[in-house]
Image (cartoon, rainbow, N blue to C red):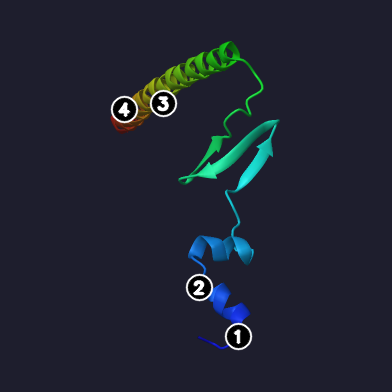
Amino acid sequence: MLGIPELDTGLQLDRSTREIELGLEYGTPTMNLAGQSLKFENGQWVADSGSFTGDRREMQRLRKRNQQLEEENNLLRLKVDVLLDMLSETTAASRLMEKELEELKSHSRRRKK
């Protein structure tokens, strides 16, 4: 090929071997967060197998608590929506009453003249 045996051999290696040999293999991105080892796979951060230091019951408890908090959050969002609707209705009714009051005052002033 190029006449230089070392270069010819390097160029003939398959892609994965070249990456490893030439330092182009970066591996899977990993990080440690609060004692939990995570790795980036298929576009998501996932727990590295065997890195969870808690037991299965603790994991189930945390999942259950997470579910409870999500349900509570949904209920609170619903309550906020209801309160906003009530506020809108009250504001509309108040404005209507103010308008009617102004009309009555105006009508009363015209009668006095």
- At a point 37% along the width and 27% down the height, the residue shown is 88
Amino acid on which disc 1 is placed: Ile
The earlier-in-sequence mark between 3 and 4 is 3
Name the element at disc 2. Answer: helix
Q: Residues within 10 Å of mark 3 (few under 14, many from 20)?
A: few
Task: Kindly identify which residue carries mark 1.
Answer: 4
Q: How many marks?
A: 4
As measured in the structure, the alpha-carbon distance from the residue carrying label 1 to the one carrying label 3 is 78 Å
Between 44 and 75, which is closer to the camera in this rendering? 44
Between 108 and 24, which is closer to the camera in this rendering? 24
Q: Residues within 10 Å of mark 1 (few under 14, many from 20)?
A: few
Between 61 and 9, which is closer to the camera in this rendering? 9
Task: Kindly identify which residue carries mark 2.
Answer: 12
Task: Kindly identify which residue carries mark 4.
Answer: 100
Between 33 and 87, which is closer to the camera in this rendering? 33
Question: Which residue extends farthest bottom?
Answer: 3
Name the element at disc 1. Answer: loop
Indicate which label's residue lies in the foreground, 1 or 4. 1
Task: Kindly identify which residue carries mark 3.
Answer: 84
Name the element at disc 3. Answer: helix
The earlier-in-sequence mark between 2 and 3 is 2
The earlier-in-sequence mark between 1 and 3 is 1
The earlier-in-sequence mark between 1 and 4 is 1
Q: Residues within 10 Å of mark 2 (few under 14, many from 20)?
A: few
Amino acid on which disc 2 is placed: Gln
Indicate which label's residue lies in the foreground, 1 or 3. 1
The earlier-in-sequence mark between 4 and 2 is 2
